[in-house]
Image (spheres, grey):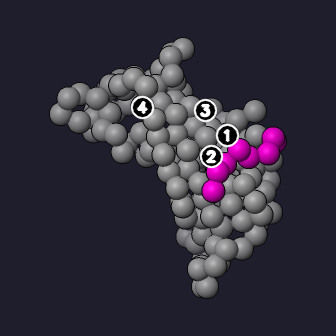
Amino acid sequence: MGFVFDHYVRFHETDGAGVVYFANELVMCHTAYEASLVAAGLDVGQLFRAETVAYPIAHASIDYRQPLRCGDRVSIDLTPTSVDQSSFEIQYQLTLGERLAAQALTRHVCIEVASRRRCPLPPAMEQWLARWGDHSPSLATH
């Protein structure tokens, strides 16, 4: 039920060994996240201006299974899951053809910008979760 995003690895994303620099795979995941927001009808310009609420990443992890190289077509399948009323996580599967290249996870917390305190997710983000989300309870460990 998740959102699928295709990404072509560019030369500038690689390191001296000719493979994707490790941090750039998280950048690819975030690009897929942004595309899923747009596909769900959200205005990412307004969302990321963070005038009233923001969604900082509280945790990120990635496990690499095989190297990615310039010109590779990577499919990024993301599935968001609600953790509680003010946070969500996104699981990412990066595949190269039929092979798993990496698995990643980002956990986001909704906060009021002025107070920097947690707040409930706004309806637009709840709708995004419903559109692309895994509707089973989260298995996140806190």
Residue type, numbered disc 3? Asp
Which residue ends up furthest to the top in the rendered image? 98
- 10 Å neighbourhood of mark 2: few (<14), some, or many (≥20)? many
Q: Nearer the viewer, mark 4 or mark 1?
A: 4
Horizontally, is 9 left or right of 60 in the view? left
Q: Are marks 1 and 3 in contact (CB under 8 Å)?
A: yes
Considering every residue shown, the one lying at the far left of the view is: 16
Q: Residues within 10 Å of mark 3 (few under 14, many from 20)?
A: many
> Where residue 25 appears, x then y in whole percent?
42, 39
**Which label was assigned to residue 79?**
1
Q: What amino acid type is highlighted by mark number 2?
A: Ile
Q: CA distance from mark 4 to mark 2?
A: 17 Å
| Contact, mark 1 vs mark 2 (Cβ under 8 Å) | yes
| Image point (54%, 14%), residue name | 98
Quarter in which the N terminus is drawn: top right
The span from disc 1 to disc 3 (Cα, nearest Å) is: 7 Å
The answer to which of marks 4 and 1 sits earlier in the sequence is 4
Against 57, residue 10 (above or below) is above
Query: Mark 2 against mark 3, which lies toward the viewer?
Result: 2
| Residue 90, label in figure | 2
For mark 4, give the secondary structure: strand
Which label is found at residue 77?
3
Residue corresponding to mark 4: 64
**Is residue 68 in view?**
yes
Helix, strand or loop at mark 2:
strand
